[in-house]
Image (cartoon, grey):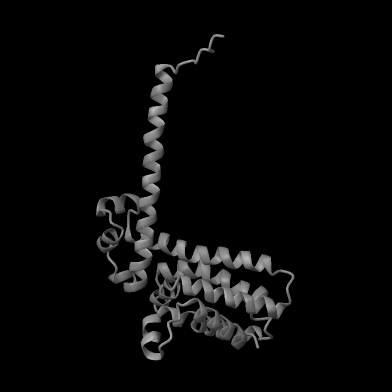
Amino acid sequence: MTKPKVKSKSKAQIKATAKTRPAKSTASRGEATRERILVAAIEAFAEKGYEAASTRDIAYRAETDQGLLTYHYPSKDDLWRAAADRTFGSFDKRMDELLIELDHADPKARAREFIREFVRFSAANPEFFRFMVDEGNLLDDRTKWLVDTYLKKRFITMKERGIIRAAGYEDSQAPHVFYALIGAVQLIFAVAPNCKRLTGLDPRKPKAIEAHAELVANLIVP
């Protein structure tokens, strides 16, 4: 019995295959580099604020060079917006998913779980609060973009579908509840080392996170 002949690849096919391999590898490396830069940028902007954070320091943290950082993010403002998109975009996505998951729940139960999940997210992403504080005292283009792109949407959602009305607050109280909630949820994680030294409690521990989630949920939605 004769073995079937295996059709060998033509030179053109071999060349085409060889060309696609480096392209895929280069794309993968580029994605990994952008990811490292974004993580480093979020860390630097959260620690130092926009003005004090330098692209040179961010490149160093990302273990890449300045030229490569500029290739992916031509300006510091581009990099800041990408970092903010990553931070606030992931929060928006999770909160929207949660509202869908809890759509048929009792309004107060839904509002409390919304807060609990906000606490968990804030514990995992303490830079979220620092971004807001750094930009909160300004009214520049970055602040306007942050408010108009992310915070306004979340404020309206919390007022109409989330916490404000479900907890029985008047619409006129919405600004007070919104900022009271943000402070109550996030401050403890943004200053975690301070909290640990002052009280002995490390708020980043899972048990402490859940205790904080329960307290704030019942404090805001009695």
Q: Is residue 99 above or below residue 212?
A: above
> Is residue 206 toward the left or the right of residue 76 in the image?
right
Coordinates of residue 135 in the picture (x, y in percent): 40, 74
State the residue lying farthest toward the top.
1
State the image coordinates of residue 25 (x, y, percent, origin top left): 38, 40
Q: Which is more toward the observer, 68 or 151? A: 68
**Is residue 113 positioned above or below 27 on the image?**
below
Outermost residue, bottom direction? Answer: 199
Question: Which corner quadrant holds the N terminus?
Answer: top right
Residue 191 sits in which quadrant? bottom left
In front: 211, or 128? 211
Quadrant for the C terminus in the image: bottom right
Q: Position of residue 129 (x, y in %)?
A: 44, 75
| Residue 107 left/right relative to 8 | right
Residue drawn at x 28%, y 58% as measured from the top left: 59
Residue 78, can we see it?
no
